[in-house]
C-alpha cells in the first residue's frame, strides 16, 4: 500500500509567501487522491454496487489499496470525507489534532431523530464544555488508575452467573444456543450491574431477564436499521414514512424507553447501591444528566463487547492450537487473544474526528470542519503494519514470545479498537475485564462447535457483525481428554 511520502511527490504543490518573504509549499484537500467519479452521481453507483453500508469496510479497504493510505471521497452527500490508514497519521489525529473538545461524525439517522423529537442523549452525542465536564467525571470512575478494583466485582459476578447457567443447560449433553442473543444479553447485564454495583439485589428476577431480552433485541435493531438507511435519501424516507425509517424510529423509541426505565429504577434505589449511578450522584450530577449518560451507556454495551466476544470465540474454534495454548497458559495470554481478534475484527471499523481548526494532516493542509475517517479495519490488516496480517496469531502481541522474531512488521498503533486521545472509548476497561473473563471461562469450561459458519465473513452494521445467523453447539469440556 502507498504511504503518505509517496503522495507528496505525486500531486501539484501550492505555494504561499510567509511574512519573512520565504516561499513555503503545501498540499490542500484538492490534491488528496480521489477515485474516478461520474457527473452528478459521483461514486454513488460504485457504492451501491459494492453492497452499500453493509460492505463499507471492504469498499474503503479496496479504495486504500487503489489510492493509498489517504484519499478523499463523497460517499453520501456533498461533503468530502478524508480517509486515512497510516498509523502515524492516525496517531497524530487522535493525540495532536482533535483539540480540547474532540468532535466526531454522528450517523445521520440518529441526528435526524434527535432533531425531530428533541431527545437529548448521552456522552456520545455531547460536544464542547458539556461533553468535557461530564467526560471528566466519567473518567474518574471508569478510566483512572485502580478503577478496576471496583469494576471487577460486578463484572465477574455477572459472568460467573452466566457461565453457571450455561453449565446447567449443557449438563445433559449438547445444547444449541443463539450465540448472538446470548452474548447481547450478557453485555447488557454486565453494564446494568456496573450501574448497580455489588451490594444490590435489584433486578434479580425472571421479569428482569425478560426485560433484558426485549431490550437487547431492540438495541440490535437500531444498528441494523441505521445501516439500511445509509446511502438513501434520509429526509425523503422520513417524510414519506417509509418502512426503512419507521423500523429505525421504532427501535430507537423502544430502546430509549427501556433504557431509561432501567436507569430510573436504579436511581430510585441509588442509596442502597454502590455502582456507577451512586458514584455519579455523589459527584452532584443531576438526575436527568445521569439518565442520559447511563441510558446511552446501556444501549452502547450490546454490540461492542458482544460481537468482539463472538469473533474471538469463532477464531478460537477455527484455530484449535491457539485454544489449547490459551487453556495451558496463564491469564495474560487471553489478553493477546483478544487483541488479535480486535485487530482482525475491530468492533468499530472506522473512527472519526472533525478537525477543530486548520491544520496539517500528513502532507496536506486541511481546513477547520474537515471530517476525517480512520480506517481501522484496513490498518489492522495491512502487511506493512502486521506480518501475516490475515492470520490469527495472538503471540504477535507477546514481546517475550520467540516466535515473534519471524514477524518483521508489528505496529501496535495500527490497531486501535478503542481509539486514542481524550475521546477514546469510555468503556474500554469494562470491555477488557468482561472480554478476558468470559473468553477464559468459556474456553476452560466448554467444548465449542459452531454451526453454519461456512463462508462466514464480516459485514458492517455500524459495527462488524457476521453475515449470517450463527448457532453454538455447547458441551461441557472433558478434562480427561488429552489436548
Image (cartoon, grey):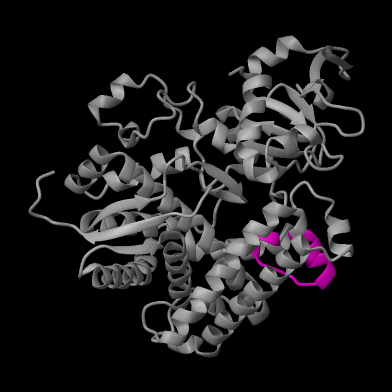
443 or 473: nearer the eye?
A: 473
Q: Is residue 236 above or below residue 333?
A: below
Q: In the image, what residue occupies the spot 25% across and 44% down? A: 323
Magenta run includes residue 123: yes
Q: Residue furthest right?
A: 40
Residue 267 % position (x, y): 55, 85
Q: Quadrant of the C terminus?
A: top left
- Residue 21, by quadrant, is top right
At horizontal 65% and vertical 78% (from top left) the residue drawn is 257
Front one among 241 and 206: 241
Which residue in the rendered view is the most extreme toward the left? 480
Which span of residues is magenta-colored? 110-125
335 or 426, nearer to the observer: 335
Rendered location of residue 342, percent (x, y): 45, 43
Q: Main secondary structure of the magenta part?
A: helix
Does residue 62 appear in this view?
yes
- In the picture, measured across the screen, residue 175 lies left or right of residue 422, that is left
Quarter of the image for residue 361 reads: top right
- Locate residue 355, reporting x and y percent: 75, 41
The front one of 181 and 312 is 181
Residue visible at 30% across and 26% down in the picture: 404
Q: Does residue 147 sit above or below 463 in this rendering? A: below
Amino acid at each position: 500500500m502507498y504511504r503518505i511520502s509517496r503522495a507528496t511527490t505525486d500531486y501539484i504543490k501550492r505555494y504561499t509567501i510567509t511574512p519573512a518573504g520565504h516561499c513555503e509549499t503545501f498540499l490542500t484537500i484538492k490534491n488528496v487522491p480521489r477515485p474516478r467519479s461520474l457527473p452528478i452521481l459521483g461514486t454513488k453507483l460504485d457504492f451501491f454496487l459494492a453492497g452499500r453500508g453493509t460492505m463499507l469496510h471492504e469498499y474503503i479497504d479496496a479504495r486504500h489499496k487503489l489510492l493509498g493510505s489517504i484519499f478523499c471521497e463523497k460517499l453520501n452527500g456533498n461533503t468530502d470525507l478524508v480517509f486515512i490508514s497510516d498509523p502515524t497519521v492516525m496517531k497524530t489525529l487522535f493525540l495532536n489534532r482533535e483539540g480540547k473538545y474532540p468532535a466526531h461524525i454522528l450517523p445521520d439517522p440518529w441526528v435526524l431523530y434527535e432533531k425531530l423529537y428533541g431527545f437529548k442523549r448521552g456522552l456520545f452525542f455531547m460536544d464542547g464544555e458539556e461533553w468535557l465536564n461530564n467526560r471528566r467525571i466519567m473518567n474518574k470512575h471508569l478510566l483512572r488508575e485502580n478503577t478496576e478494583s471496583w469494576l471487577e466485582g460486578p463484572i465477574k459476578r455477572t459472568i460467573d452467573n452466566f457461565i453457571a447457567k450455561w453449565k446447567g443447560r449443557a449438563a445433559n449433553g449438547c445444547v444449541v444456543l443463539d450465540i448472538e442473543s446470548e452474548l447481547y444479553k450478557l453485555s447488557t447485564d454486565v453494564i446494568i450491574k456496573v450501574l448497580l454495583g455489588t451490594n444490590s439485589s435489584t433486578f434479580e428476577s425472571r421479569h428482569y431477564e425478560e426485560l433484558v431480552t426485549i431490550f437487547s433485541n431492540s438495541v440490535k435493531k437500531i444498528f441494523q436499521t441505521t445501516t439500511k438507511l445509509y446511502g438513501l435519501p434520509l429526509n425523503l424516507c422520513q417524510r414519506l414514512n417509509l418502512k426503512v425509517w419507521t423500523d429505525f424510529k421504532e427501535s430507537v423509541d423502544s430502546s430509549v424507553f427501556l433504557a431509561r426505565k432501567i436507569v430510573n429504577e436504579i436511581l430510585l434505589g441509588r442509596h442502597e447501591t454502590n455502582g456507577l449511578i451512586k458514584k455519579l450522584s455523589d459527584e452532584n450530577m443531576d438526575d436527568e444528566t445521569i439518565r442520559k449518560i447511563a441510558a446511552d451507556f446501556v444501549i452502547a454495551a450490546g454490540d461492542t463487547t458482544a460481537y468482539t466476544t463472538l469473533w474471538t470465540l469463532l477464531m478460537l474454534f477455527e484455530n484449535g492450537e491457539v485454544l489449547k495454548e490459551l487453556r495451558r497458559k496463564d491469564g495474560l495470554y487471553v489478553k493477546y487473544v483478544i487483541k488479535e481478534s480486535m485487530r482482525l475484527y475491530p468492533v468499530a471499523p472506522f473512527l472519526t474526528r472533525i478537525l477543530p481548526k486548520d491544520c496539517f494532516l500528513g502532507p496536506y493542509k486541511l481546513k477547520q470542519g474537515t471530517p476525517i475517517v480512520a480506517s481501522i479495519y484496513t490498518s489492522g490488516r495491512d502487511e506493512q503494519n502486521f506480518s501475516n496480517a490475515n492470520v490469527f496469531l495472538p503471540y504477535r502481541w507477546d514481546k517475550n514470545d520467540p516466535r515473534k522474531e519471524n514477524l518483521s512488521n508489528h505496529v501496535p498503533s495500527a490497531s486501535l479498537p478503542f481509539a486514542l486521545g481524550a475521546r477514546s472509548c469510555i468503556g474500554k476497561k469494562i470491555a477488557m475485564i468482561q472480554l478476558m473473563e468470559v473468553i477464559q471461562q468459556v474456553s476452560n469450561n466448554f467444548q465449542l462447535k459452531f454451526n453454519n459458519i461456512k463462508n462466514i465473513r464480516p459485514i458492517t452494521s455500524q459495527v462488524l457483525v457476521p453475515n449470517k445467523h450463527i448457532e453454538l453447539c455447547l458441551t461441557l469440556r472433558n478434562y480427561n481428554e488429552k489436548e
